[in-house]
Each structure stands twice: as structure tokens, then as C-alpha cells.
Amino acid sequence: MNSTNLQKNSNEQIHFSSSELFLLEYLEKHIDNIPETSIVKLSELANVSTSTIVRTMKKMGYDGFTSFKHHLKNEQEFNPKFAIIDQVDQKIRKAIMKNEQELTKTIQMLDSGTIEDAIQNIKASNKITIFARGFSEFIAKEMMIKFQLMGKHCELHDDPNIIRSISKKIDKNGIVIFVSLNGETAELVEAANNCNQHSVRTITFTANSQGSLAKLSEITFVGYKSSFSYFPEYEVRSRLPLQIMTRILLDSYAIRMQ
């Protein structure tokens, strides 16, 4: 395949630098290996920077290196080596669909009445205490900051021992929010029991409707969690359902406060 086949842009007045011309020459000589080559790997093999690759692609009329690879696939549709591009695309589409499914189903599961109840309880409270562990702490921190920006006295605790201790001392006029994907974290369950014993109002965000936290909480938001994980060996499942629900509550609360 010569350079005229590689180039999508028909403008012959485009000037290529010496490094860009070297890259074009490398591409022509190793065209069959391109489908399996990442932009970083190509940078190493051709001894040019990734910015040179992107710049060259744009001069040739492509959006980037991936766009160039798709052009090659279309031109060499009968070359089995280019089938890997479709395979990778399918895997990426699967990842997109997984997140779309969690987003869509979680929104469908939300109830406006539950949102309104949560807003009124938060509004009536003199203090918000948020308990979260692990990756859920990032979501909880965002909640804390936004509540504070809206003038609410709000604090977050993520240490197991502090959670156990603080949960025994919360005022009845306060409210506790739990953020937990599986709803079974031991110290959070213990804290929920402590809150119940002292008649403290509780709200839980979870993806497990049958979890202990969901059963112990006064108000529960349940999101949809995909059973598939790209990190099956670790407890780092997507917190997207929790992010969606907490963000909707925060936005709704902000609207009510206007």
C-alpha cells in the first residue's frame, strides 16, 4: 500500500516534516501490523512521539490514529488481520452498554416520592452525618461538600472505629446517610442499628435491596448494579448507580432550596 492509499486528504500541498515522512514510510512497510499496534507502541517502533503520530494523522485527513485504523479496515475488509479492530470495538461497545444499562435502570428504579421524603427529612435536620467506606467514600465526599455549599451542617466519617463510636452519639434532630454498594459493610450495619436504637432518621444509597442497610434504613434508594465486572478479583465494582442516585438527590434538594 503506497502513501496515496494511506492519505485520506487529497490536498497535495500539505507539507510533512522529516519525522512525519519517516512515520509514513514506516506505516507503508508495516501496514499489516497496524491493527494490533497501539499509538504508544507505534511511537516506540517508529521512534517518533505520539504527538507526531496524531499530527501526521490529521494532516492525512483523519481524526486520529484510531480513525486511520478504521480507514485501513474498510480498505482491506478481506484481510483477516484487520478483524481484530471489530473485535476490540465490540468489547468497547459492551463496556459502554454496561454503563448505559446501569444508568438507565437505576433512573427507572427511582421514585419521586422517595426523593421528596429524603429532601424533607434532610431539610428538617440540624445536621447531616454521612458514613461510607471504600470507593463509596468518593461519592460521600462529593455529597458532603455540596450539602455544605447549600448551607447544611454536614460531616463525613469513613474510619470503622469512628463510625461505630459516632453513630451512638448522634442527636435525634440529625440525620444519617449511608453510602454502600452492597449494603453489608459490618461497621455501617452496626451504625444503622445504633441509629435505630436512638430513633435517628436514616437514608441509605445502595445497589442491594435485600442488604442489611436497606432493611434497617428509614428511606432507601436502590440502584441497579451489573453482575459483570472488569475487575472480578477485587472489590472495586462500579459505583455508577450510587453516583446517579446521590447526584439526583443533591440536584433535587438544590431545586427545593431555591
Image (cartoon, helix red, strand yellow):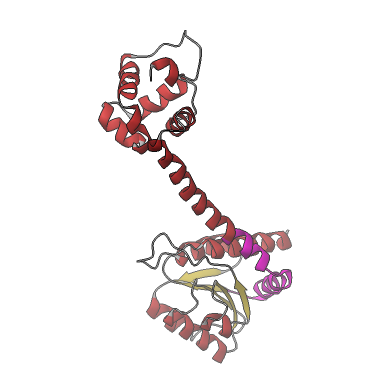
In the rendered image, residue 34, in percent from the top left (x then y), is placed at: 36, 32
- Residue 68 in the image, given as x and y percentages of width and height: 45, 29
- Residue 86 in view of the camera: yes
Number of on-image labels? 0
Q: Position of residue 139 (x, y in %)?
A: 50, 63
Residue 111: in magenta span: yes
- Towards the viewer: 53 or 30: 30
Name the foreground residue: 108 vs 151.
108
Q: Residue at x 41, y 11 (%)?
A: 15
Q: Which residue is drawn at 30% across and 36% down?
A: 41
Q: Is residue 136 above or below residue 96?
A: below
User: Which stretch did the figure color magenta?
Assistant: 102-127
Could you say which is closer to the camera, residue 217 or residue 26?
Answer: 26
Q: Which x, y percent locates residue 61?
A: 49, 21
Quadrant, the C terminus: bottom right
Q: Nearer the viewer, residue 99 or 32?
A: 32
Q: Which residue is drawn at 26% across and 32% down?
A: 44
